[in-house]
Image (cartoon, coloured by chain):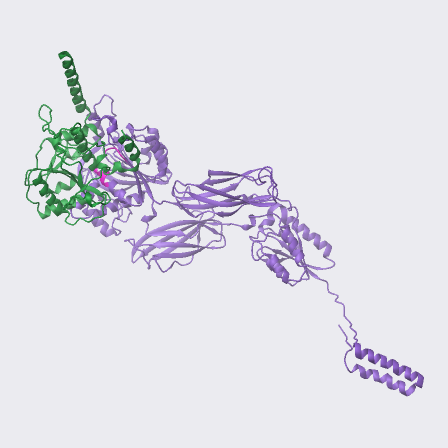
């Protein structure tokens, strides 16, 4: 409290002793007293002195102690060191200050001293700005590794705060070394057989001797590797912190959703090995459908189907046509023939995996390559490829495919006729090959729901049924074929002896791929027959269009297609799912009724098996499906709260027409910055303390 | 000297007999027309349409003996009114002299046939009257053919004046479908090229004016039935090769135009 004597009334009080002196003192003493009063008066008038009486503040200061509990504090026992530091501060200041404890990461929360030991490093980000701005204490002590990764730079806000800040690290980390993958730039989509580039940086903190290695794995298979020297080139001076840019490029050979992993070989000195690894996914698409078509002889089936496939801009067709067999004679020298060597070994042991669909038409492998090559075809199919065998006397049993790997993947059972003898003449051999062959005209019969994507050639079940009923007759089939259990006979024909039906088109799945057995070599008759009726070959074209897309598992056959906007969504965020809906004419529709179901599983999505296994899945509530306003595009939002696999299924209908369902998957991930750079940021802590005074 | 000639003749006879035996033993020929992959179908009309009734036999034989094609030895004669027409996608049309116009329905059938994927091999043999009739027929089939062409070079000089036909490029698949053709041949050598009409990105009408079919007939002794003009060396061989190439082209399309074949073919053409 201050008392000030600078009021004018104070001078009145000075006149009182002056009057007393005039009345009672002797003249000499009176003048002395009056002179003295004049001096006082001049002193007060000129200098206006005052007395200030201040009351001392007897309350003790309040000091806040902030303990960093972000994830990076879980490294190298930092959190426990921080606890011990807090306890030490408490024991020193407890008698002189009121201490309050807080934990902070992305938010600040007060904790009791008794509960300090219960603090766990679980904050997924570090925001130091709110601590700097906090003015409710007389002093602040921050115990942190200084790795802020959220909000403003704390140094930018420190200048406006006058409360002193003391900082200290958790200890044990000033010389920590670490390698981390940062600034990863990888596309979410790519094309098969086209180069994909991945850029990232290896962050090197601390002085690391020697060399390490970065590996790129595709579905756990190493596809690229690069040596790095964290300590710099030999002879150079290693830096305290540096970034090494790295680029990988590779060419994916199969169209599928692939998991990739980047991993730096960890060094023993590293304080954090978690940031040495990054996972990401790339959806590899086809730019074109690649088909390898092998025909054992020139035929009308080959001629017309080749013409159709060649005219489809989405198809990249490679064909091999056997124009001459070893038992054919030559009437001119070899150099007058346009024939080339059939590169069977190259095609069926190496190149086959570059294709989406392999077609064998009336082709017997026996003359051209050993049975062991067929194992590659089985492997190709089980790995996701497609295989179609088109009939003919040298297909199926007539081509020698019984007891081969092809028998395992074909959807039909073949009947073996008496084995050929080398002493038999070609006509005799031919006769045996033809034992199951029936030269009869027949109309195909629909054996499955007309809505099957291969059968619905008009996009409308009723119209498709009518078209199938009117399709021209086919000719010739192998009567000995039988569909295997568990396969789908799509088209059938009546047996000439009236004993039942023979499968004409049978479909099956084998591993991750699909196979088909077309038990006739005469679909060209649909094309020519329709022309003879004055119709276009449109439905012949549609049949093949749909069969090929079905076999290669093309999303084109789906009227509802689902596309996650991003394949990796950070936990805590919302995923946006885009949906495309088209009607039976493949026209985009805006009034479709779409229902989205999202199932979550904590298991990682595996490219090895994308079939839905919902046993351990839980349903995730999603937002409503809304139309975006153009092009048949809809969207739905899905909250992503957990790390794991999210499977989205959208069922739809349009004006009473079932549009089927579309499916897609994405991952909930935790792309945490806390692990990107985990070394102690001593420089920042020092500057915060210095700036606060 | 006489002895040497006798020895040479004996060796020649031996090889001919051996060849014929070999041919008969290994050639697989369908006994049922419906069983064969390829049938030589010939178009008839109300005119002289069959100058070489036996030619197809040797063509079938050669095709079966030298290629993997399973060909029926007999021909199938069809009219443009036959419903079966559309199950024989390769049709030979030749003749002498003019013939009465086909009906509108028949013309429509031929148009449908060619657009559906069928191929017509037109052999005029340079006969002016037959040529005029055939051109009139094709003119009715494609009265205003203005489809964009992918095969023919876009040069006016390559177009036959007043007709739908254009010269077939030398590197087109017909000239490489099995044999490499040195030059366009036939019983005559009047025209050093083939002409054609492109339908649906494929040459669907192939026209020869050099009497290709005329090189095939033989007498009972196996000698050529008709002499060549001018009997240039290799003329018959090239005609045989070209005939078979046309048949193989109908079954294989532009197979030999695929990229995979080009390096090999170019290498062989340097011979």
Pinpoint residue A120: horizontal percent, then vertical percent.
60, 51
Whether residue A544 is visible here, answered yes or no, is yes
Most extreme residue toward the front, as rendered? Answer: B157
In the figure, is residue A287 to the left or right of A2? left
Instruction: Determine which quarter of the picture holds residue A526.
Output: top left
Whether the magenta-drawn stretch holds residue B43 is answered as no
Where's the C terminus of chain A, which quadrant? Answer: bottom right
Where's the N terminus of chain A, which quadrant? Answer: bottom right
Whether the magenta-drawn stretch holds residue A298 is answered as yes
Whether residue B198 is visible here, answered yes or no, is no
Give whichever of B210, A83 is nearer the camera. Answer: B210
Q: Which chain is green?
A: B
Most extreme residue toward the bottom, as rendered? Answer: A23
Give whichever of A547, B93 is nearer the camera. Answer: B93
Instruction: Determine which quarter of the picture holds residue A594.
Output: bottom left
In the figure, is residue B54 to the left or right of A520? left
Pinpoint residue A337: horizontal percent, then vertical percent.
24, 30
Q: Which chain is purple?
A: A
Give whichever of A429, A690 is nearer the camera. Answer: A690
Which region shows up in magenta? A293-304
**In the rendered image of this protein, does residue B181 appear above or below residue A648?**
above
**In the rendered image of this protein, does residue B238 appear above or below residue A239?**
above
Circle count: 0
In the figure, is residue A475 to the left or right of A663? left
Give whichever of B242, B247 is nearer the camera. Answer: B242
Pinpoint residue A384: horizontal percent, then vertical percent.
37, 40
Pinpoint residue A261: horizontal percent, then vertical percent.
48, 42
């Amino acid at each position: 409290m201050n008392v000030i004597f600078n009021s004018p009334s104070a001078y009145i009080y000075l006149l009182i002793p002056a009057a007393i002196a005039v009345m009672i003192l002797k003249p000499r003493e009176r003048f002395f007293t009056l002179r003295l009063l004049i001096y006082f008066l001049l002193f007060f008038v000129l200098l206006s002195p005052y007395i200030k009486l201040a009351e001392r503040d007897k309350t003790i200061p309040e000091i806040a102690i902030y303990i960093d509990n972000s994830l990076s504090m879980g490294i190298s026992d930092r959190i426990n060191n921080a606890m011990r530091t807090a306890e030490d501060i408490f024991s020193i200041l407890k008698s002189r200050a009121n201490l309050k404890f807080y934990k902070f990461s992305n938010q600040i929360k007060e904790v009791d001293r008794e509960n300090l030991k219960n603090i766990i490093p679980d904050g997924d980000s570090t925001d130091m700005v709110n601590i700097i701005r906090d003015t409710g204490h007389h002093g602040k002590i921050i115990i942190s590794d200084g790795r802020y990764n959220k909000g403003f730079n704390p140094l930018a806000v420190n200048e406006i705060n006058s409360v002193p800040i003391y900082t200290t690290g958790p200890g044990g980390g000033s010389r920590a070394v670490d390698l981390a993958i940062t600034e990863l730039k990888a596309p979410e989509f790519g094309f098969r057989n086209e180069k994909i580039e991945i850029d990232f940086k290896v962050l090197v903190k601390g002085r690391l001797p020697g060399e390490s290695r970065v590996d790129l794995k595709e579905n756990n298979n190493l596809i690229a590797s690069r040596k790095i020297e964290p300590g710099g080139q030999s002879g150079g001076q290693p830096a305290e912190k540096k970034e090494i840019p790295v680029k990988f490029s590779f060419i994916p050979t199969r169209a599928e959703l692939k998991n990739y992993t980047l991993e730096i070989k960890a060094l023993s000195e590293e304080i954090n090995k978690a940031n040495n690894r990054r996972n990401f996914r790339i959806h590899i698409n086809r730019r074109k459908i690649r088909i390898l078509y092998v025909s054992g002889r020139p035929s009308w089936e080959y001629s017309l189907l080749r013409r159709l496939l060649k005219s489809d801009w989405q198809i990249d067709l490679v064909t091999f046509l056997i124009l001459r067999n070893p038992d054919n004679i030559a009437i001119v020298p070899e150099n007058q023939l346009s024939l080339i060597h059939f590169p069977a070994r190259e095609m069926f042991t190496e190149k086959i995996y570059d294709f989406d669909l392999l077609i064998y038409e009336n082709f017997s492998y026996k003359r051209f390559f050993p049975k062991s090559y067929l194992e590659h075809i089985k492997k190709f199919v089980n790995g996701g490829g497609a295989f179609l065998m088109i009939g003919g006397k040298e297909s199926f049993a007539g081509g020698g495919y019984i007891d081969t790997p092809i028998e395992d993947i074909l959807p039909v059972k073949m009947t073996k006729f008496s084995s050929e003898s080398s002493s038999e003449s070609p006509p005799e051999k031919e006769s045996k090959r033809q034992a199951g062959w029936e030269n009869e005209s027949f109309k195909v019969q629909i054996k499955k729901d007309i809505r099957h994507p291969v059968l619905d050639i008009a996009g409308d079940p009723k119209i498709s049924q009518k078209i199938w009923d009117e399709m021209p007759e086919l000719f010739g089939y192998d009567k000995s074929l039988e569909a295997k259990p568990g396969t789908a006979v799509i088209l059938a024909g009546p047996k000439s002896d009236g004993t039942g039906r023979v499968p004409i088109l049978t479909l099956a799945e084998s591993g991750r791929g699909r196979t088909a057995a077309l038990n006739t070599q005469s679909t060209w008759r649909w094309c020519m027959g329709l022309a003879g009726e004055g119709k276009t070959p449109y439905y012949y074209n549609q049949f093949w269009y749909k069969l090929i897309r079905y076999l290669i598992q093309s999303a084109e056959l789906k009227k509802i297609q689902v596309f996650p906007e991003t394949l990796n969504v950070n936990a805590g965020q919302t995923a946006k799912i885009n949906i495309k809906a088209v009607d039976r004419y493949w026209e985009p529709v805006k009034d479709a009724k779409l229902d989205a179901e999202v199932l979550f599983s904590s298991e990682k999505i595996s490219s090895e098996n994308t079939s839905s296994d919902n046993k351990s899945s839980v349903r995730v509530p999603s937002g409503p499906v809304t139309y975006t306003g153009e092009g048949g595009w809809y969207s739905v939002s899905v909250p992503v709260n957990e790390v794991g696999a999210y499977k989205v299924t959208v069922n739809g209908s349009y004006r009473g027409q079932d549009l089927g369902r579309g499916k897609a998957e994405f991952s909930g991930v935790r792309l945490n910055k806390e692990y990107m750079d985990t070394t102690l940021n001593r420089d920042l802590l020092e500057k915060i303390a210095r700036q606060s005074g | 000297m006489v002895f040497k000639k006798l020895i040479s003749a004996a060796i020649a006879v031996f090889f001919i007999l051996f060849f014929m035996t070999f041919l008969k033993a290994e050639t697989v020929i369908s006994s049922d027309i419906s069983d064969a992959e390829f049938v030589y179908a010939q178009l008839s009309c109300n005119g002289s349409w069959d100058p070489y009734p036996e030619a197809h036999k040797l063509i079938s034989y050669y095709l079966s003996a030298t290629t993997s094609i399973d060909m029926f030895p007999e021909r199938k004669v069809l009219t443009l009114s036959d419903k079966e027409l559309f199950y024989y996608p390769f049709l030979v049309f030749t003749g002498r002299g003019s013939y009465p116009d086909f009906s509108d329905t028949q013309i429509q059938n031929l148009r449908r046939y060619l657009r559906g994927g069928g191929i017509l091999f037109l052999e005029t043999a340079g006969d002016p009257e037959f040529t005029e009739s055939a051109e009139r027929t094709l003119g009715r089939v494609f009265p205003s053919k203005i489809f964009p062409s992918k095969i023919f070079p876009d040069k006016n000089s390559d177009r036959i004046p007043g007709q739908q036909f254009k010269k077939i490029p030398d590197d087109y698949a017909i000239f490489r479908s099995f044999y490499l053709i040195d030059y366009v041949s036939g019983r005559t050598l009047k025209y050093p090229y083939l002409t054609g009409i492109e339908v649906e990105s494929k040459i669907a009408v192939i026209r020869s004016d050099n009497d290709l079919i005329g090189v095939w007939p033989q007498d009972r002794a196996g000698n050529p039935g008709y002499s060549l003009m001018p009997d240039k060396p290799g003329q018959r061989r090239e005609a045989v090769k070209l005939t078979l190439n046309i048949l193989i082209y109908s079954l294989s399309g532009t197979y030999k135009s695929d990229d995979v074949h080009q390096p090999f073919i170019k290498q062989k053409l340097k011979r």
